[in-house]
Image (cartoon, rainbow, N blue to C red):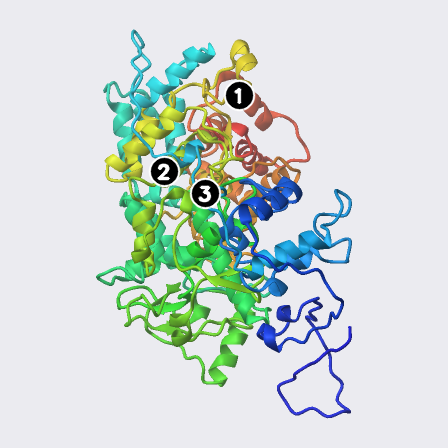
Amino acid sequence: IRWIGFATGHKTETSDRIYLSDLVLSRTWNDVLDLSPSQIPSMNHKKQATWNKQVDFRKEIYPLLKQRCFSCHAGANPDSGYRLDVYDELLGFSTGEELIVPGQSQQSKLIQLVSSKAAEERMPPADSTKPLSEKEVALLKAWIDQGAQWDHKLLPTPKTESDHWAFQTITRPKVPVRKNSNRIRTPVDAFIEQAYQEQGIQPAPEAQKQTLIRRLYLDLVGLPPTAEEIETFVHDTDPRAYEKLVDRLLASEHYGERWARYWLDLTRWAESHGYQHDLPRPYAWRYRDYVIESFNKDKPYDRFLKEQLAGDELVPYSDENLIATGFLASARISGNEMDKAAQRNDVLVDIVNVTSSAILGLTLECAQCHNHKFDPLTQRDYYRLQGFFVNGQLGNLSLKSKTLPNPTDLKTWISKGTFRFYQREVKKLINKKQFQHTTVPHTWGYYSPLTGHAEIKRLPVVNRHPIPYSAERLKQMKSQILIRGDVHKLGPEVGKGWPAVLGAISESSADLSRVGLADWLTDRKNPLVSRVWVNRLWQYHFGRGLVSTPSDFGVQGEKPTHPELLDWLAVELMEHGWSTKHIHRQIVLSSTYRQARALNEQNIKKDPENRFVWSWPRRRLEAEAIRDSILCATGELKRNVSGISVPQEREDENLRRTIYLFQRRSEMPSVMTMFDAPDSIASCSRRQVSTVALQPLFMLNSQFMDRRAQVLAKKIIDEVCDDHRQQVERAFQSVLGRVPNEQELQRSLAFFQGDVSFIEQNRRLPILCHALLNLNEFIYIP
């Protein structure tokens, strides 16, 4: 290093000690200084080969590139990540990283690499072939200095297109005609039956009515039926009894609580910022309630997406739309990041990644740093999609309604233990006159001062180091490619748009709003959104999607087991007003859904993973449904819908459904932690199901479970007094919705009558109740 300079921004003295960080070492000045070539001093006085005649691209440059470069730097997925066979890519069209600067060979990275003396840097690599000769380097320099003319007929710019099945327009397949089959109840069965015949598979018989009602209750509302409800359904002779039960459950207000949880997994929703300090977001619960209400209303899925992506832009303004932006605002915010550009970019990256995976079913995140290695997705695609969100920011946003619950005194609903640090930070802001408690209702959401309603007010955000908010600065933000994903290496501006492989965007649409993005997502020509959503619905019913990689419909994802059924459901969704409940009915009314769980040795040999759904799959309840079912069995569950979250410290005082427990990323409710609930850091498309020692320890030994068993036992004694037989029968009915069989009854009575000296008589019924709550029959969907 011959020279190094520094600037502190202040007057410096010779005695000052300068500490350097982020030191840039480079072989060219233009990497470090923003100077024109004429201002950059020449440091290489060695006489080099020159080229004094006009270069012919077809006869001289193309053969050189083909012979020495194209083996690693050509084709749709070059090993190196760089393409030299496409002119736009040489100019950094998709990556922002210019390989050549026409007219300036000294500033061109291509020349720096081919002429480098460092073996580890030089191209072609030292271990693969010899370096370019001085004459070849001079030829490339001359070509660039002369304007880098290109023969677009010889090497045309390829169109961004793909023959991958997921990127093809959806058309409605014909429903297969299956003669003499009494299993066809909905078109779903026709497609499934066709696969059975092709695979030589024999489906399981229909499950018993007692099994079906329990399955429907747990699947659609996440709560078990009572013994009386089971008894009524089993003895109902109405041929439409099953269909009426489905309609009643879909109309239940508890349906939204069950299915909202799946969507909240996708959106990585929680009620805190995340990262080190993980400060609470006291009003984030409004978005959870919005999702619950949307599912209960069967809000059309296209409208559901539009409100969440562009609620602050929609006309006319409504509080509901603004609350819906909690989808975008669920991103985490670091409170310990001093680099504000990086802090803000982390949020934008989070938003783009979740939007692409949850809605489009694409793994777009790797395109943040480089073009996708497998799918036809580029960095340019990534940052054009990010362009829809660069003018907005997360925060506390004012609402207009005066009737919304608005707990201004946090101490009335949360404990000091959970919010101590939050309260301390609030006091600091109050002392600085940057914050004041307000009676104006507000929500945690996303707002763009450029395109959002002007009357929306943004209130201060409590965090150790909040992202600075400037409405004027946000209005001026432009989307730029970040070279290699580095927020401090800005590439060219790219505007707004969606991935080119999914359809071109006209130049006149360069100022697209997020409303425009939502309209494109739900356009009939979009090949992904409806496919992805119906596949998720199938997965939530059966435990496995028709596409088993629900958030990866790309080239590396799994192919659908029933592609025609997938497309039929996708078209059915769009043609029936994007109704989610309509798709539910098509699935749960089918014979496929009503199957019993039955093993078949021949089927196992042909389809060991049950990919073709020849038997009801074994499915354990999710963490929330396990806890809710326990409280339902004991009669303690409070079923009021929506409202402020319950702090974990006050769980026993207000035994509501698990979805209403306060969900802090660093301190999730214990039952969710035990039973594989997501950590709300990234979008979760499919929960893992583990079987570990802590789960039975929690179910057998935790204070929560011990209290539940005692409550259930006391309830039974109050109802049937000291008759052990009736106690046993009532315990089975409360927990499993059925009476015990003869063997179960005799073993239970023997437990009461046996001489078990170490167990007091008044503890035996709670122990029996506790044992029943641990049965697989209780925590698995039958």
The numbered mark, 2 or 1, whose residue comes first in the sequence reads 2
Number of numbered discs on residues: 3
Query: Residue beneath label 3, please?
Result: 153
- Which structural element holds mark 3? loop
Farthest residue to the top: give it.
180
Name above or below for residue 430 compared with residue 598.
below
**Amino acid type indicated by mark 1:** Glu
- At horizontal 52% and vertical 80% (from top left) the residue drawn is 428
- Which structural element holds mark 1? helix
**Amino acid type indicated by mark 2:** Pro
- At horizontal 54% and vertical 71% (from top left) the residue drawn is 340
Name above or below for residue 478 compared with residue 182.
below
On screen, residue 137 versus residue 345, left or right, reads right
Query: Could you give the CA–CA distance between mark 3 and mark 1, rounded to whole angstroms?
Result: 81 Å
Q: How busy is the neighbourhood of tag 3: few (under 14 within 10 Å), some, or many (20 plus)?
A: few
Query: Could you give the CA–CA distance between mark 2 and mark 1, rounded to whole angstroms?
Result: 54 Å
Farthest residue to the front: give it.
53
